[in-house]
Image (cartoon, rainbow, N blue to C red):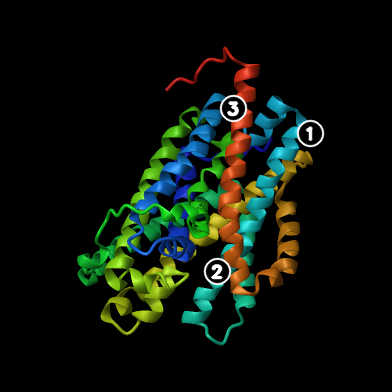
C-alpha cells in the first residue's frame, strides 16, 4: 500500500540493531540467570529454537514477494481472521518500545544522571524514537545505517580494549551437560532477542529482492549469535559467572562494578554509544511497522499521524513501567508468548498457503 522502499541490506542492519541493543540491555542479564554455569549452551539452544518461526517467516516472504503479513493473512484466511491473528503482533510491536525505554533509562540514570527521574529519561528516549518514526520507514532505515557506521568501529575498539582484561579460566567449562535451563522463565524471556525477523514480515512489501530474504534472516541470526557469544564471553571473562548473574543489565555490570579500572575509563562512552543508537532505531522500526499495519487496515494514505497518536498514548501509559520490575516482567513474559504465538500463526498461514496454492512455483534462488 505504501510506496516506501528499503533494501535487503537495510532490513538486515535493522535486525542487527536488535542484537546490539538487546545484548546490552536485557539478553545476557536473562541468560546469566538461567544457569549456574556458563550460559553458552542455552545461548545456542535459543538460536536453534528460533529457527522454527524464522524458517516459516522466510518461506512465506519468499513465496509471496512484495506482500507483507497483513496481505498474506487477508488472502489466505480472509480479512476478518487475518486481522484477528495479526493484530496481537501489532500490539507486541507497540508494547516493546516502552519496556525497552524504561530499561535503558535505568542504566543512564543509575550511571550518569543520578538526579534525573527515570520516567523523564524514559519519555526522552521514547520521544526520540517516535520522532524518527514520524519521518517514515525509509528515514528509519537510513538513520539506522548511519548509526551502525559509528557503532561498528566502536565495537571493534571495545573488543580490542577488552580482551587484555579477560581471564579465560573464568569462562570455562564451555560445555556442561545440564538442561535445567529449559524450565527457567528467564531462558524463554531471552528468546525475545531472536524475534527481530518479525519486522521482515511487516516490511516484505517494501523490500527489493524479497524472494531471497531467507539469506538475510538466517545470515543475521548466525552473525547475531556470534556477537552474543563474544559479549557473554567478555562479561564472564571479566567478572565470572557468580557476579555476572547478580545483575539484570550487562552494561550496568561493567560501568558500575568496574568503573574505577583503566579498562572502563577507556571505553565507558563507547559502551553507551554502542547500545544507545541501535536501541533508538530498533524501537523506531517497531513503532513504524505497527503504525503502517494500522494504516493499511484503515486504508489511510499517511500512517505518520498514527505515530503521533501512539506517542501521546504511550506517554500517558508510561507510568505503568515506572517500576523497573514491571519493564523486566514485560520482556520476560513477552518473549515466550510472542514466539509461541508467532510460530502458531505462521504455521496456520503456511498450511493455508499449501492448501490454497499447492502448485505455486517455488521462488528462484
Q: Is residue 158 visible?
A: no
Marks 3 and 2, how far apart at CA:
36 Å
Q: Secondary structure at mark 2?
A: helix
Position above or below: 19 against 63: below
Q: Is residue 304 visible?
A: yes
In percent of width and height, residue 362 lies at 50, 18
- Which quadrant holds the C terminus? top left
Pointer 3 or 1: first along the chain: 1
Asked whether, in this view, residue 160 is left or right of residue 142, the answer is left
Q: Which residue is mark 2?
A: 103
Q: Which residue is mark 3?
A: 350
In percent of width and height, residue 298 lies at 79, 41
| Numbered mark located on residue 20 in the image | none
Q: Which residue is mark 1?
A: 80
Q: Residue furthest top?
A: 359
Asked whether, in this view, residue 100 is left or right of residue 47, the answer is right
Q: Secondary structure at mark 1?
A: helix
In percent of width and height, residue 97 lies at 61, 60
In percent of width and height, residue 224 lies at 39, 50
Q: Secondary structure at mark 3?
A: helix
Pointer 3 or 2: first along the chain: 2
Amino acid at each position: 500500500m505504501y510506496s516506501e522502499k528499503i533494501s535487503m541490506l537495510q532490513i538486515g542492519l535493522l535486525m542487527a540493531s536488535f542484537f546490539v541493543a538487546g545484548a546490552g540491555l536485557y539478553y545476557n542479564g536473562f541468560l546469566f540467570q538461567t544457569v549456574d554455569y556458563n550460559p553458552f549452551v542455552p545461548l545456542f539452544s535459543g538460536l536453534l529454537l528460533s529457527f522454527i518461526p524464522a524458517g516459516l517467516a522466510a518461506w512465506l516472504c519468499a513465496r509471496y514477494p512484495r506482500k507483507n503479513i497483513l496481505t498474506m493473512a487477508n488472502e489466505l484466511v480472509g480479512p476478518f481472521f487475518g486481522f484477528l491473528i495479526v493484530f496481537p503482533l501489532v500490539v507486541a510491536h507497540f508494547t516493546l518500545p516502552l519496556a525497552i525505554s524504561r530499561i535503558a533509562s535505568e542504566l543512564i540514570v543509575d550511571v550518569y544522571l543520578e538526579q534525573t527521574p527515570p520516567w523523564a529519561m524514559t519519555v526522552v528516549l521514547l520521544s526520540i524514537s517516535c520522532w524518527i518514526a514520524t519521518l517514515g520507514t525509509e528515514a528509519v532505515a537510513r538513520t539506522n545505517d548511519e548509526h551502525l557506521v559509528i557503532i561498528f568501529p566502536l565495537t571493534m575498539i571495545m573488543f580490542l580494549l577488552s580482551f587484555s582484561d579477560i581471564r579465560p579460566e573464568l569462562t570455562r567449562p564451555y560445555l556442561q551437560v545440564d538442561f535445567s535451563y529449559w524450565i527457567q522463565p528467564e531462558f524463554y524471556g531471552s528468546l525475545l532477542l531472536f524475534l527481530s525477523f518479525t519486522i521482515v514480515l511487516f516490511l516484505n512489501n517494501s523490500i527489493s529482492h524479497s524472494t531471497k530474504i531467507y539469506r538475510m534472516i538466517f545470515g543475521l541470526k548466525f552473525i547475531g549469535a556470534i556477537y552474543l557469544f563474544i559479549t557473554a564471553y567478555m562479561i564472564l571473562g571479566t567478572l565470572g559467572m557468580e557476579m555476572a548473574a547478580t545483575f539484570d543489565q550487562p552494561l550496568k555490570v561493567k560501568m558500575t562494578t568496574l568503573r574505577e579500572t583503566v579498562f572502563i575509563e577507556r571505553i565507558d562512552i563507547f559502551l553507551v554509544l554502542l547500545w544507545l543508537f541501535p536501541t533508538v532505531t530498533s524501537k523506531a522500526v517497531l513503532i513504524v511497522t505497527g503504525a503502517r499495519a494500522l494504516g493499511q487496515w484503515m486504508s489511510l494514505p499517511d500512517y505518520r499521524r498514527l505515530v503521533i497518536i501512539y506517542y501521546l498514548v504511550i506517554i500517558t501509559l508510561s507510568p505503568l513501567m515506572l517500576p523497573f520490575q514491571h519493564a523486566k516482567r514485560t520482556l520476560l513474559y513477552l518473549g515466550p508468548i510472542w514466539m509461541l504465538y508467532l510460530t502458531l500463526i505462521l504455521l496456520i498461514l503456511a498450511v493455508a498457503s499449501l492448501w490454497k496454492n499447492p502448485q505455486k512455483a517455488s521462488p528462484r534462488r
